[in-house]
Image (cartoon, rainbow, N blue to C red):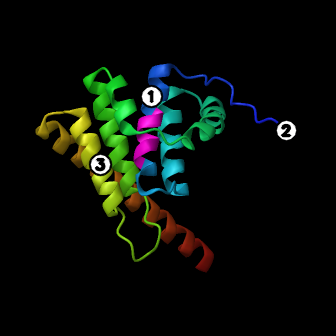
Amino acid sequence: MTTIQPPPPPSITPQQMNLLRTVASMAWSDGNLETEEVDLMLGQFSQLFSQDTAQQQALQQELQEYLTQNIPLEELVPKLVTPEEKELVLRLGYEVICASARTPEEPNVNSEEAAAYQRLVQLLDLPPETVKRVEAEAEGELDAQKGLVEVLVIKIEEFIQG
């Protein structure tokens, strides 16, 4: 019989791990962790916690295992200390729930994700104007990413047809 070994301790701080787990909890809110959500979280966190590309790629592989752990927001949010951490979690949580829909007919943010986001907002206890500002910044970034993807698709199509 084979015993399952727990993953080695991460090369990030406990504070950084708490940020990751809080955002992962948002991604799990609909009971399903989508590839788009995982990619977004790993990309954002590896850039945040590491400076060079090689370190970022290694960190993405290492953190993948921790994303499968679904820990309740109520256990994680109280460990967020600074307003900057709370804003970062709010922004990443917002981006994660906006990242994907399970089916083309489903809205990007389903009812479970919307409820989890509202619970996150309540637990973070940030001023309403801060929440609005962070959401607007996240929407701007998401719109920019969609714009970039659309431009790349057009350029690739032109190249293929060229």
Left or right: residue 50 compared with residue 139: right
- In the image, residue 144 lies at what x, y percent? 35, 54
**Residue at disc 2, secondary structure:** loop
Left or right: residue 74 compared with residue 152: left
- For the N terminus, the image quarter is top right
User: Cα distance, mark 2 to mark 1?
Assistant: 30 Å
In the rendered image, residue 131 lying in the magenta stretch gets the answer: no
User: 10 Å neighbourhood of mark 2: few (<14), some, or many (≥20)?
Assistant: few
Q: In the rendered view, tell whether residue 82 sits above or below residue 31.
A: above
- In the image, residue 117 lies at what x, y percent? 29, 48
**Front residue of 159 and 66:** 66
Which residue in the structure is indicated by mark 3?
Answer: 117
Q: Mark 2 and mark 3 in contact (Cβ < 8 Å)?
A: no
Q: Which residues are magenta?
A: 20-26
Which residue in the structure is indicated by mark 2?
Answer: 2
**Residue at disc 3, secondary structure:** helix
Q: Is residue 106 visible?
A: yes
**Residue at disc 1, secondary structure:** helix
Left or right: residue 9 compared with residue 121: right
- In the image, residue 13 lies at what x, y percent? 51, 19
Residue type at mark 3: give it. Answer: Tyr
**Front residue of 134 and 27:** 27
Q: Residue at x 55, y 74 (%)?
A: 157
Which residue in the structure is indicated by mark 1?
Answer: 18
- Residue 92 occupies quadrant: top left
In the rendered image, residue 24 lying in the magenta stretch gets the answer: yes
Mark 3 / mark 2, whichever is N-terminal: 2
Q: Is residue 162 visible?
A: no
The disc at residue 47 is none
